[in-house]
């Protein structure tokens, strides 16, 4: 059964909560972070992207950068910008996008749950990215950013959450610059906290939706601390890490699309002819075309949009990986036609989250930066769960969740 543990969160005073909350470390580069945090000393980016307080161009993996993260975190606490709650609470973090609100329970997940597979993943992680976040956790001795989990919905938990959010003013409530709403409640009634923890014990497993590298880093550092502590009891705070748990029936995965720099030396005629062998192709003209079902793809090339429907026999609906459109596109087009065999390392391909819209695909092709773009029908949450349950791993850049969690509304100290 999955662990959900209350903890003493470090939180900003309400009056600076919107200024302190930031986008996650991995959705913007150093230059973008410098711009976003400019003139805002409260931004958590000073801790999660600490290179912004050092000379431009510095290698963000230098020890000096990690030291800066530690120093900035200490200053935030000394200045009263992050204050630790007196009791161990659970919290509710809700997000609103396009009129729809999803409600997550903020509490600690268990390191042992990650190591023994109760927390299930659907993506591979890269060792270099793991180590980067591990260094950050080690030097701050904290989980500065929550990871995004989902779990099979529990009606009794949903009802408790509903009663809390309808009967109490949120501790934080703001709309970020991107138009997404963020709402946060502290569950101060310890009897309610205990009830939720008890109900969560019935949850057989949880799933990493977003934040695989942060999850791995948090769990590995926690296990590292356990192995290095001869007096380990199992009750230490490092046995747990910060997560927001959303019921699976409230989440939506949006499309994650591809743009390719060249046609692998093929003429347009040869390229289109190769596609014709595995897809039914319909030209859609200059108006943006969005895929409307599984195995239907949108392609933009040479000023025109096309509908591509995978021909029967080119995919396997009985295989949890083979049924995915990212697999179909990778095998039929990227590998067989365009010669892109490794999505993780190829410099000829880039990935565009659906939040940017299909107009971004058109822009990148029309600019001459890219030769062709492909839009995919979104993966379903059930597909993600089926793959995680089967022990399989999705291809790279398959899922895109929105809205992203804001970092800084709550921090988990490993002390």
Image: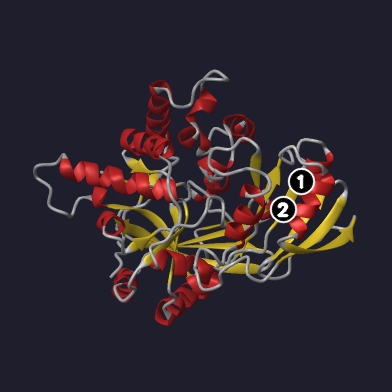
Q: Secondary structure at mark 1?
A: strand
Q: In the rendered view, tell whether residue 318 sits above or below residue 131.
A: below
Q: Quadrant of residue 332?
A: bottom right
**Image coords of residue 341 (percent x, y):** 57, 44
Residue at the right extreme, as displayed: 285
Q: Quarter holding the C terminus? A: top left
- The structure residue drawn at horizontal position 23% and vertical position 42%, both measured from the top left corner, is 224
Q: Residues within 10 Å of mark 1 (few under 14, many from 20)?
A: many
Disc 2 versus disc 1: distance between alpha carbons?
Answer: 7 Å
Q: Are marks 2 and 1 in contact (CB under 8 Å)?
A: yes
Disc marking residue 19: none
- The structure residue drawn at horizontal position 70% and vertical position 45%, both measured from the top left corner, is 259
Judge from the rendering whether residue 374 lies leftward or rightward of residue 205; answer left or right.
Answer: right
- The structure residue drawn at horizontal position 37% and vertical position 65%, both measured from the top left corner, is 188
Judge from the rendering whether residue 321 lies leftward or rightward of residue 276; answer left or right.
Answer: left
Residue denoted by label 1: 372
Residue denoted by label 2: 374
């Amino acid at each position: 059964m999955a662990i959900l543990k209350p903890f003493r969160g470090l939180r900003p005073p309400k009056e600076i909560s919107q200024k302190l909350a930031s986008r996650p470390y991995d959705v913007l580069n150093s230059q973008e972070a410098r711009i976003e945090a400019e003139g805002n000393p409260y931004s958590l980016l000073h801790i999660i992207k600490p290179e912004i307080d050092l000379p431009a161009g510095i290698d963000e993996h230098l020890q000096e950068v990690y030291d800066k993260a530690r120093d900035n975190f200490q200053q935030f606490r000394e200045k009263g910008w992050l204050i630790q709650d007196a009791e161990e609470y659970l919290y509710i973090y809700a997000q609103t996008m396009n009129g729809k609100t999803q409600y997550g329970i903020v509490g600690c997940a268990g390191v042992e749950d990650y190591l023994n597979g109760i927390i299930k993943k659907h993506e591979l992680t890269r060792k270099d990215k793991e180590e980067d976040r591990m260094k950050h956790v080690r030097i701050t001795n904290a989980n500065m950013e929550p990871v995004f989990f989902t779990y099979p919905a529990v009606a009794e938990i949903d009802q408790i959450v509903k009663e809390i959010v309808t009967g109490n003013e949120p501790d934080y409530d703001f709309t970020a610059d991107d138009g997404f709403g963020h709402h946060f409640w502290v569950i101060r009634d310890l009897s309610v906290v205990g009830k939720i923890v008890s109900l969560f014990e019935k949850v057989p497993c949880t799933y990493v939706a977003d934040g695989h590298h942060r999850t791995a880093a948090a769990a590995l550092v926690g296990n590292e601390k356990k192995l290095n502590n001869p007096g380990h009891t199992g009750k230490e705070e490092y046995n747990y890490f910060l997560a927001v748990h959303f019921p699976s029936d409230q989440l939506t995965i949006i499309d994650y699309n591809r743009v390719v720099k060249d046609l692998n030396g093929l003429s347009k005629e040869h390229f289109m002819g190769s596609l014709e062998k595995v897809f039914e192709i319909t030209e859609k003209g200059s108006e943006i075309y969005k895929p409307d079902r599984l195995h239907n793809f949108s392609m933009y090339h040479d000023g025109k949009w096309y509908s591509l429907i995978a021909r029967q026999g080119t995919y396997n609906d009985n295989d949890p990986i083979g049924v995915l459109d990212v697999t179909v596109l990778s095998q039929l087009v990227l590998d067989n036609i365009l010669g892109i065999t490794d999505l993780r390392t190829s410099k000829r391909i880039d990935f565009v989250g659906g939040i940017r819209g299909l107009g971004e695909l058109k822009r990148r092709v029309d600019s001459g930066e890219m030769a062709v773009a492909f839009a995919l029908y979104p993966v379903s949450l059930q597909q993600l769960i089926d793959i995680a349950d089967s022990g399989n791993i999705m291809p790279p850049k398959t899922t895109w969740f929105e809205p992203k969690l804001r970092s800084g509304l709550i921090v988990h100290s490993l002390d």
